[in-house]
Amino acid sequence: MNNKPVIAISKVSTRFGEHIVHTELDLEVQRAEIFALVGGSGSGKSTLLREMILLQSPDAGSISVLGVDLQGITGAQALALRQRWGVMFQSGGLFGSLTVKENIGLPLREHTRLDDVLIDEIADWKIAMTGLKPEVGMQYPAELSGGMMKRASLARALALDPELLFLDEPTAGLDPESAGEFDQLVRELRDRFGLSIVMITHDIDLLWQVADRVAVLADGKVQGIGSMAELSQLDHPAIRKFFAGPRGRAAQENSSPPARRNEIKTRPSWKQK
Amino acid sequence: MKLSTTPAAITLRSTQKYALSGAWTARGIDSNLLDDKTMATPARGQMVMDGGQIEALDSVGAWVLQKFLHRLRQNGAVVEVSNLPPAFAPIMAVAAEEISHRADAPAAPTVSPGSSLESIGRSTKELAEQGLALFSFVGETSIALAGWIAHPARVRWRPILYNIRSAGFDALPIVGLISFLLGIVVAYQGADQLRQYGANIFVVDLVGLSMLREFAPLITAIIIAGRSGSAYAAQIGTMAVTEEIDAMRTIGIAPLEQLVLPKIIGLLIALPLLTVFADLLGVFGGMIMARAQLGVSFAEFIERFTKAVSVTAYLIGVGKAPVFALVITVVGCFQGFRTHGGADSVGRQTTRSVVQSIFLVIVADALFSIAFSALDL
């Protein structure tokens, strides 16, 4: 496989009227890495994510995802590109009128020529893969708990076996146990299938346990980038916020040695440059 | 990974050897990949699948392939996949694990669709439940209203005034236009018949009585049911879905007092006023048509109008409006509160509120007609 970055963002500027969100922001995400975007409220990380998944376009600069430049992309290219990534939205984004199984099967029904029996089997498999019970497939999103909703949403994002997975606040609103299981799940997906994962999160444990690299956004730019261990050495105020305070310190102490060893071992090509 | 366009294929090289090729992915696999012909091949003894030509393999491909292997093995064959690129090994292993796991587990219980008798029973039960719920909603609303009457300081004037504006004042143009057109239609339809008997002047009786007694209150109520009744259901329904109603309760604001009573009082005031406005424009429409078609001048029309149309006719028409207003708000708010789930449910309850309130308005109007004829009004 090639060493080209899966996502390359260069000199992106975004503004909403008077409010400036990004100023000449640069960022690269490598293949098969778990990349996290962090930053305070209003630092533009959600906007950046929306720009990466073609829901919004920046005012200036260029973004290329999976080798496709998003500026001036045609409808057909966008459709093909959208089938190569999966997105898990913060509040699920599951369709309320469909059962969980129908939600997961929807991308397959829409984009492939598989028959219904096979689609149902695949949907059942994805349900099992994300750690949900088989009965959940027949339920409607309104009947699910927060954690089940996140898992179902992840299962739908995985329906077409994407190369790239975007997660928006994957553990927000989950109890610590579910959040821990989610950490495990995300790592497994990367290790088994070589997925590249981009996530927005505030979950300090998730950052220590799972993320290979973390980018801190503040004042419209990336203020620091690297593994959590590397970031913890930096002295920028926006970065210090994540390590200062009892929660940050506790998470740092709890980040288990095996996880950190694993992180170093799997640290991908960007280190070799 | 490149997007591969070569479709997945499976070919029989010899009796014991299959060759797999193409993209075994969600997009590369056709539903008739493993058609009856492939499946009918007798499976026995030692078999080999050559996977060297597989270009891409995702979870769908792995699933289809492992299921095929599983079936062959169940039929007594010993199958092996050779030359499979090592990159595809993990996904194949996961698929195999899941399939063997699922073969052991009992099949998920299927829900039977149920007989028609059962569905009739279910819908009857649902209807009865809904009737009962409506009954208790009316009761609770009455208690809340009684509370307001007992403690007038608790009355929320601001939402009442807001509702009078949004359901009443803002509806003036559409109500006026439609009743004006209705007046024209009534006069026009009557003109032909009346001219034959030379009874041109009786167009005033026709337009005046029919507009004031029946058409103006009815058409106003139907417009408002479609316009405001649906808005009530959608607003309360969306609030129920986003937990705003629960939030209101926990803060200590009774949702009935904040959401329902202002709407009821607002429409109780606005709908009779709208009806009067509809009376005016309906009769005006009739007047214009009477002059154009029957040569009845405005002065003649008004002179005859004062004789032909009694105050009773006017009061009967306007008197129905508060009843219609109650029907529209109660049904709209009730359906809004019955929303649960998501966007789908909001749409369903809104539709229901409009259909039911129009239906009930017409039923109420029919009951009024019977009652008034019994009373000789």
Image (cartoon, coloured by chain):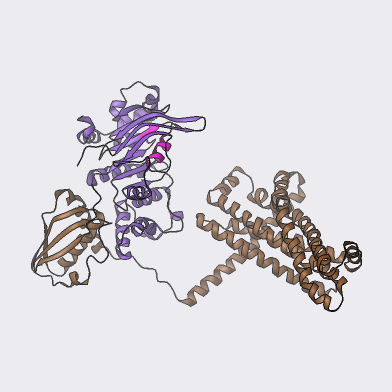
Chain colours: A purple, B brown
| Residue B171: x %, y % from top left | 71, 53
| Residue A30: x %, y % from top left | 26, 36
Q: Is residue B260 left or right of residue A236?
A: right
Report the residue that reaches farthest toward the top.
Answer: A235
Highlighted magenta segment, given as a residue range: A37-56
Residue at figure coordinates x 17%, y 73% from the top left: B40
Q: Is residue B134 left or right of residue A198?
A: right
Up-down relation of residue A2 to residue B47 (above or below): above
Question: To which quarter of the image does residue B320 belong?
Answer: bottom right
Report the residue that reaches farthest toward the bottom.
Answer: B197
| Residue B292: x %, y % from top left | 81, 65
The number of callouts visible is: 0
Quadrant housing the N terminus of chain A: top left
Up-down relation of residue B261 to residue B104 (above or below): above
> Viewer-proximal residue, B366 or B85?
B85
| Residue B287: x %, y % from top left | 83, 63
Up-down relation of residue B32 to residue B271 (above or below): below
Q: Is residue A268 left or right of residue A135?
A: left
Quadrant housing the C terminus of chain A: top left
Question: To which quarter of the image does residue B305 belong?
Answer: bottom right
Residue at figure coordinates x 59%, y 54% from the top left: B234
Magenta stretch encompasses residue B278:
no
Question: Is residue A39 among what the camera can see?
Answer: yes
